[in-house]
């Protein structure tokens, strides 16, 4: 269970249709924490699996460009694979387009959840995300138990977040992922018989994606535009560089191509440094998640003691647990800036809202 979330925390998922929504909003105690919507059909869907045609390979950057079945161009991350122009390869879309960058994919089929990544056709992979673990540890025992719930030809990567969660939620997530893959995928029995790019799994629906992100939330269907006012107001605020908290602390979010800088203007708050840092850590991490800020992030923290900086960093880490992107927080550096990186996943919220307005 999240260390920073009390049992009284109310999680809700708003949708505009009970079965096939075009948008979903995830709220905690009335505050918007995540917003997703359908995009244009020519935008590769996150989590979709394709047989793509490799176009160019850039070995020095471990990247390749490729084309999927609808003609969209994507970028593919490589490691040691020996691919050439014209080859067909199975890829999974891991990042939506953002800025001038195309959608990015990883090689191979991968079904990603909040707690686990399932790997069809790679049964030899059973590990913890980014960590090597001994086969004598409780974590490895958990992985061994979870493997029994999956087809024999599947591998599994257990995310670090899963070690803090109840086993039943991890099991439920695996059931959702496997069921959706079984019902909606069309994997070829022999890749050698495929001669053109092809989509073999469309990715999960917004309903199932929201259930994966917030497994404890209750669903509410809001069909009237007026019912979405509380969501729309918070979306407008989250698209502005200036954010004012409930305790009158102004926080500035400034993004460049290289990084996002976050500045805390506490002059009117009249709070002590520790009280202020406790307040803004929750707000900032919620806004990073809602705004879908990614890449390098630096936060200009209030003037704190060494102990205070540690408390602020740990508080941010606690609040980051709710973000499915699993931000990596490195602590406060010599310049007094809290440093973190957040993996790219969804396009920034401001870009999503523009794309949504264009579709409407």
Image: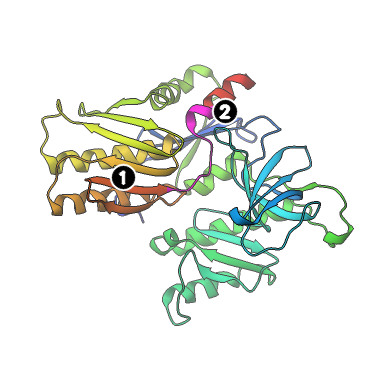
The first of marks 1 and 2 along the sequence is 1
Assign a secondary structure to mark 1: loop
Residue 135 seen in the current view: yes
Q: Position of residue 59 (x, y in %)?
A: 64, 56
Q: Position of residue 316 (x, y in %)?
A: 29, 48
Could you give the CA–CA distance between mark 1 and mark 2, rounded to whole angstroms? 26 Å
Residue 77 located left or right of residue 324: right
Assign a secondary structure to mark 2: loop
The residue tagged 1 is 8
What numbered label is drawn on residue 16?
Answer: 2
Identify the coloring: rainbow
Depth check, front residue: 333 or 90: 333
Circle 1 Cα neighbour tier, 10 Å, few/some/many (<14 / 14–19 / ≥20): few
Q: Quadrant of the C terminus?
A: top right
Depth check, front residue: 113 or 78: 78
Residue 188 located left or right of residue 356: right
Farthest-out residue, bottom:
136
Farthest-out residue, front:
60
Depth check, front residue: 220 or 107: 107
Q: What is the span of residues highlighted in magenta in the rendered image?
A: 342-352
Task: Say which residue appears at 10% left-offset and 30% top-offset.
Answer: 270
Looking at the image, is 244 positioned above or below residue 96? above
Farthest-out residue, top:
226
């Amino acid at each position: 269970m999240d260390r920073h979330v009390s049992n009284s925390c109310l999680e809700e998922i708003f949708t505009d249709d009970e079965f096939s929504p075009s948008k979903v909003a995830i709220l905690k105690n009335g505050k918007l924490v995540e917003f997703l919507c359908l995009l244009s059909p020519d935008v590769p869907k996150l989590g979709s699996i394709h047989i793509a045609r490799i176009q160019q390979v850039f070995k020095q950057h471990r990247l390749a460009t490729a084309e999927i079945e609808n003609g969209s161009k994507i970028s593919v991350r490589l490691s040691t694979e020996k691919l050439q122009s014209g080859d067909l390869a199975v890829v999974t879309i891991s990042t939506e387009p953002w800025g001038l960058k195309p959608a990015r994919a990883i090689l191979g089929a991968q079904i990603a959840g909040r707690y686990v990544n399932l790997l069809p056709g790679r049964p030899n992979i059973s590990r913890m995300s980014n960590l090597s673990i001994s086969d004598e540890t409780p974590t490895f025992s958990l992985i061994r138990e979870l493997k029994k719930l999956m087809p024999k030809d599947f591998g599994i990567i257990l995310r670090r977040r899963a070690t803090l969660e109840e086993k039943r939620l991890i099991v439920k997530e695996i059931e959702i992922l496997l069921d959706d893959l079984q019902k909606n995928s069309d994997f070829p029995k022999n890749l050698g018989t495929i001669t053109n790019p092809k989509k073999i799994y469309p990715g999960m629906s917004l309903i199932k994606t929201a259930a994966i992100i917030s497994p404890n939330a209750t669903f509410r269907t809001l069909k009237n535009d007026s019912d979405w006012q509380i969501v729309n107001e918070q979306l407008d605020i989250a698209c502005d560089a200036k954010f004012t908290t409930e305790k009158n602390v102004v926080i500035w979010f400034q993004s460049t191509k290289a990084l996002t800088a976050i500045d805390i203007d506490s002059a009117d708050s009249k709070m002590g440094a520790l009280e202020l840092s406790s307040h803004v850590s929750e707000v900032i991490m919620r806004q990073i998640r809602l705004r879908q800020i990614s890449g390098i992030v630096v936060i200009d923290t209030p003037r704190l003691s060494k102990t205070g900086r540690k408390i602020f960093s740990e508080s941010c880490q606690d609040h980051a647990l709710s973000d499915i992107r699993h931000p990596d927080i490195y602590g406060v550096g010599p310049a007094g800036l809290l440093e973190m990186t957040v993996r790219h996943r969804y396009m920034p919220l401001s870009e999503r809202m523009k794309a949504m307005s264009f579709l409407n």
